[in-house]
Amino acid sequence: MNGQIENYYEAQQLVRMLEAVINQHKVFGDRKLFHWDSVYKTAEYHHVTNMAYYAILGMDVKLPPESREKFEKRFRQAVASEEVLENVVEAVCWQFERSARHILPGAGYACRTYYGRKDMSECQEAEFLVEKECRGLLQELMLQMNFEFQKSSQDRVSYVRNGIRLIFREKWGDSSRRVQKFFKGKPSDFPLKKGFRYVHEMSPEELYLRQICDLAESFVSEYPRMRMLMNFWLFYLGHSGQLNYRLISRNLKRMRLDEFAQRILNLAALWFGRIQMEEADYAGQELAVYMLSGGREGAEAVRRLLPYKCELEEEEIIRTRKEGAEKKWSFPSRSYMQILYPSLAAFPFLLPIFWLARLCRLGHYRFRNRRRRKEIAQSVEKNT
C-alpha cells in the first residue's frame, strides 16, 4: 500500500507542503526535481492552491518563473473571492433575518474560521439550509445581488457570480438513508447564532458529524478533496478538548460511519498532524490512495467502510440498463424494422421516419385500448 501512495510523488509533496503551513515549520529539504505543473494542477483540483503558495514562499527549492506566476495569480484570485464571499454570506444572513426566515450556513463555510489567516481557506462557495417556502425570497435576493441562476432540483437551487457559488438546500443531499434520517431537521432545529433570531449555527458536535457525513458523501458520489480533510483536521484541533465524544460516537454508530470516521481522523493526523499511522491501519492508507488517485484506486476499501456505496452503484447499473432497454424498445434495429416495414430495405435512409411511424401507431393502440377499457368499466357500473 505504501508503494501505491509513492506512485503519486507530486501529491505527496503537496501534502508535505500543506502540513508545513499548518504546523508553521520549514517545508522540506528534498532536492528531487518534480513537475511543478503537476503540483499546481493537483493543488487546483484539491482547492488548496493558496495554501501551497504559502509553502512555496518558505521553500529552498527554486520554482520556474511561469509556475510561480500561476500560484501567485491563483492566490490573488482566492484572496479576492474570500473577501467577496464573506460579504455575500453576511448580506444573505441579514436579509433572512429581516424577512424572519430561518437559515443555517453549512459546515464548509463555517470551518473558515479555524485557519490562521482568512486567505488560507480558499472558499469559493457557501451552502445554506433553508426553509421550503423561501424560493421566492431567494429569487428576489439573488436578483438584487446580481447572482445568476445556475441550476435547480426538487430540494436544491444554486446561483453563481464571478466564480462564487451559493447553494441553498431544503434538506441535506446525503445518499445514506440513515444519515438522511439523522439530519432531517429544519434550520430552526439548530442553535441560534449569537445576536440573531433567525440565523442558526451548528454546535461543535453537530459540525463534527456534518463534516464526517460530507466527507463520506464525497467518497461515495464524487471524488474527495484535500481541502475537506484539512477543514476537518483544523476544526478537530480547535475543539479536540471540548467535544462530547460519547455523543459523537453514539451518533456515528447510528449512521454506521464510526469506522469511516476513525479512518478519516487517522488519515488527517498522518497528513497534517505529523503523527505516524500504524502499519496495520491499511484502510486509512487506502483512503489516501483513493483520494490521491482521484478514485481510480482504493475503491474496495471505500466500499467496505461505506456499504451504501455498493447499493448506489447497483441502483445506477439497474437504471442504466433500464434506460438502455427502453431505448432499444423505442428504436429497434433496422433488421427488426424491415420485418414490420418491408419497404425499408429499399430505402434504409428512411429508418428514423419509420421509427416515428411505429411509435405513433403504438401510441394510437394504447389510447384506443385505454378508451375501450374505460367504456367497458362504465357499462359494468350502469348494469350494476
Image (spheres, rainbow, N blue to C red):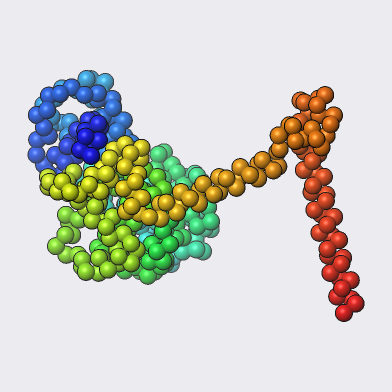
- Total marks placed: 0
Q: Position of residue 219 (x, y in %)?
A: 35, 48
Question: Does residue 231 sit above or below 72 in this rendering?
Answer: below
Q: Is residue 347 visible?
A: yes
Is 46 or 323 nearer to us in this picture? 323
Please, which residue is most extreme toward the bottom here?
384
Residue 243 lies in what quarter of the image? bottom left
Residue at 43%, 62% (x, y): give it.
177
| Residue 302 pos. (x, y %) | 33, 49
Q: Is residue 169 left or right of residue 213?
A: right
208 over 71 or under it: above or below: below
Quarter of the figure that contains the C terminus: bottom right
Q: Which residue shows up at 38% across the image and 55% down it?
A: 307
Looking at the image, residue 25 sits to the left or right of residue 296; the answer is left
Where's residue 257, x and y in %? Answer: 31, 59
- Residue at point 51%, 46% (across, down): 317
